[in-house]
Structure formats: structure tokens, C-alpha cells
Image (tube, helix red, strand yellow):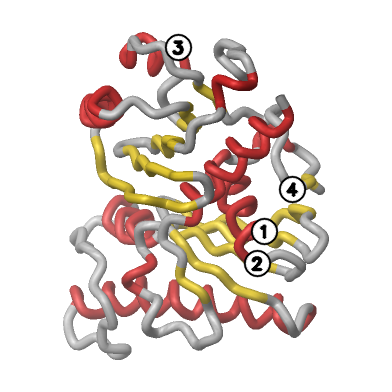
Amino acid sequence: MLVFLPRKEDFCGNMNVVIDSGNTYSKIGWFSGDHLIRYETRLSFTELIDRIRAELPERIMYSSVNRPLDEFLVALDRDVPVLNLTGILPVPVKKDYETPHTLGADRIAAACGANWMFPGKDVLVIDMGTSITYDLVDLVGIFRGGLISPGVRMRFNALHTFTKRLPLFDPEKDPAFIGKSTKNAIQSGVMNGTLAEIEGIINRYRHEIPSLCVVICGGDVPFFESTLKPPIFAVPELVLIGLNRILTYNVALQ
């Protein structure tokens, strides 16, 4: 929803700020038109507000899984047009999804970003965060849905939480396949198991769509981007790019 409706000419500036607020931290991106000028990650809510106040944009795109829009507006306390990403907000892709009201904002934002970056192509978007999501956007811009599985840290936490003797470890890049200790075995099981899952799902999709374009994004991309078989495009800030596309799409509808 648009918090307050300014005149169309109020949107004529070039600077957009887009916000992807997660369960723990927030990301923020500054855009000039379609160009991502800079971004910051792992910001607390207080840090996020401070960044925006320090350089007020022409408009803001807000997407959050844990802080309602009203809380953000009260904390910001500035007269800036704000667009909130909800299930009813128009987006530049069509949704072929049975429960659109449950579709995560980050999933649809990443899909919009991928559709804009790779127009006229079937794109599989793999977002590697708290969960790993696999979403297909077809060549005519229809979001077809996909898969959701546990993220890397969730897998480490599950082994630790649901067993009595397995300790908790952090992710490690390129662990040995055959672990020679409990730590190494867990590292291999989680990291190589996740890699096998990703490669297997990509292969299943490419069996059906040989010309499929694969894009990966999210905080855990650095653990896997060098080991996944090409051609795969790594776009870490794809969600921010998609949020900006949704913002400019809605501005054009005014």
C-alpha cells in the first residue's frame, strides 16, 4: 500500500531507497533510476533508520517480514513517500500461485529482479538465506512457484538441536567430502549435501527446460558460487534490484 499519495511530479527525482528487512538484520540499497549505487547489509533497525535519515531519498520501497510498516514510519518520522510490499501490491510479473497471500516478499522481489535482468528467458532463481528457495519465472514473465528447503545454518542447527551429542558448527567453504572427525563429517554432510541438492534440482529443471537460466542470490552464495557448475549467474543483491523494479513499476502506474 502507498502510505500517502503524493502528486505524480513528486516522484520525478532519481534517488530510490529500497529496504529488505529480515528476521534479524536489514539490507538497504540506494538506486539512481535502475542503477544500484551502493548497498549495506546486516544493519540493525536503528542503523537502518539512521542511514535513511542521513540521506533522505525521493521515495522508499519497504519490505519486511518482522516489522510492520507503521513501526517503520514512526521510527523514520520523515515526510518521504513509502511503498510497502504486500500481497496485493501490483508487481511486474504475473503470479501462477495458489496462495499468493502467503508468497514471501523476498521470493517475488527476487523473481521480479531476475525477470528484468534476463527478459524473454526461463529463469530459475535460487535464494540462499535462512531458507533456500527455488522459484521459476518463465519467459513470458509468469511466476510459476517452486520449492522451499532448509538453509545451511538451519541444517547445522537441526543436527545440534535434535541430537544429544552433536555440537553446533558454522558453515565452512569447500569442506572435504569424507570427514575424518565429527566436525568434518557434519561440515561435509551439510555443505556437500546442500550442494548436491542444488545441483540435483537444477538438473531436474534443465531436463524439462534445457535453455533455463539459473541465478543465485542471498547471503550464503559465497559458500557455493565457485563450486556450482556453470553457466550460473551470481547476483547477490537480486532482491534489492527486484524491489527497485517493483517500486518503479508502481510509480509508472500513478
Cα distance between the residues tagged 4 and 2: 13 Å
Amino acid carrying label 1: it is: Asn
Which residue is identified by label 4? Answer: 93
The disc labelled 4 sits on which kind of residue?
Answer: Val
Mark toward the start of the polypeptide (3 vs 4): 3
Q: Quadrant of the C terminus?
A: top right
Tell me which label, 1 or 3, sits earlier in the chain: 3
Residue 21's disc is none
Circle 1 packing at 10 Å, graded few (<14), some (14-19), many (20+), is: many
The residue beneath circle 1 is 115
In the rendered view, tell whether residue 157 sits above or below residue 23: below
Task: Establish if 242 lies above or below 121.
Answer: above
SS class of the residue under badge 2? Answer: loop
Residue at the location (50% across, 59% down)?
Answer: 127
Residue name at image x 44 percent, y 77 percent:
195
Measure the alpha-carbon separation of dots 2 and 3. 35 Å
Q: Which residue is mark 2?
A: 118
Q: Nearer the viewer, residue 135 or 75?
A: 75
Image position of 254 (left or right of 44): right
